[in-house]
Image: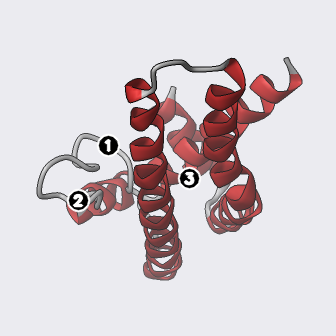
Amino acid sequence: MKKTIKITSILLMTLAVLALTGCYGSNMGGPGKNGRGNDKDFSRLADKLDLTKAQEKSLDTIKDDVRDKADEMRQESKKLHKESVSLIDKDSLTEQEVLTVFGKFKAIFDKNESFFAKKIVEAHSILTKEQRSQIKDLID
């Protein structure tokens, strides 16, 4: 149960950072999009939050860092996806084999947990209380 809560917390934090930096939304991923969010989304968010130029520049740097890390994680996940799909072809499958693949997916998130936590803290410190409240409303 604790592992499930931890994984869920990591995913929620990651989504919050991605939403905050404009990397997540209708334009994230998909054919021909290379997992890159639309910079217009970030600009619209910056306008809604009435960011200063300094805030916008700092958040843009965070956005780029998060995007790069998300691309890296996506590539690792694609490799694991192939491994997990290959399990279907096996004549017999054990629970341990499935759990091993699950563990590898979890490891991708675990090794990047600190990175995303630091980016959340960094983005949080850039925004005013009012801007954080607006972000919360957008995410809810």
Q: Earlier in the sequence, mark 2 or mark 3?
A: 3
Q: Nearer the viewer, residue 83 or 131?
A: 83
Residue for badge 2: 38
Position of residue 70 relative to residue 31, above or below, is below
Packing grade of label 2 (10 A; few <14, some 14-19, many >=20) is: some
Residue for badge 3: 17
Position of residue 4 relative to residue 45, above or below, is above
Give the residue displayed 53% in from the left and 42% down from the top.
Answer: 15
Q: Nearer the viewer, residue 27 or 131?
A: 27
Q: Are marks 2 and 3 in contact (CB under 8 Å)?
A: no
Image location (x, y in percent) of residue 79: 44, 54
Q: Residue furthest front?
A: 91
- Please state which amino acid type lies under the numbered disc 2: Asn
* Quadrant in which residue 33 is drawn: bottom left
Q: Nearer the viewer, residue 35 or 105?
A: 105
Image location (x, y in percent) of residue 8: 68, 29
Position of residue 58 relative to residue 96, above or below, is below
Q: Earlier in the sequence, mark 2 or mark 1?
A: 1
Q: CA distance from mark 2 to mark 1?
A: 8 Å
Q: Which mark is residue 25?
A: 1
Q: Residue furthest left?
A: 32
Packing grade of label 3 (10 A; few <14, some 14-19, many >=20) is: many
Q: Is residue 35 left or right of residue 3?
A: left
Q: Are marks 2 and 1 in contact (CB under 8 Å)?
A: yes
Q: Are marks 1 and 3 in contact (CB under 8 Å)?
A: no
Q: Is residue 127 left or right of residue 24?
A: right
- Please state which amino acid type lies under the numbered disc 1: Gly
- Please state which amino acid type lies under the numbered disc 3: Val
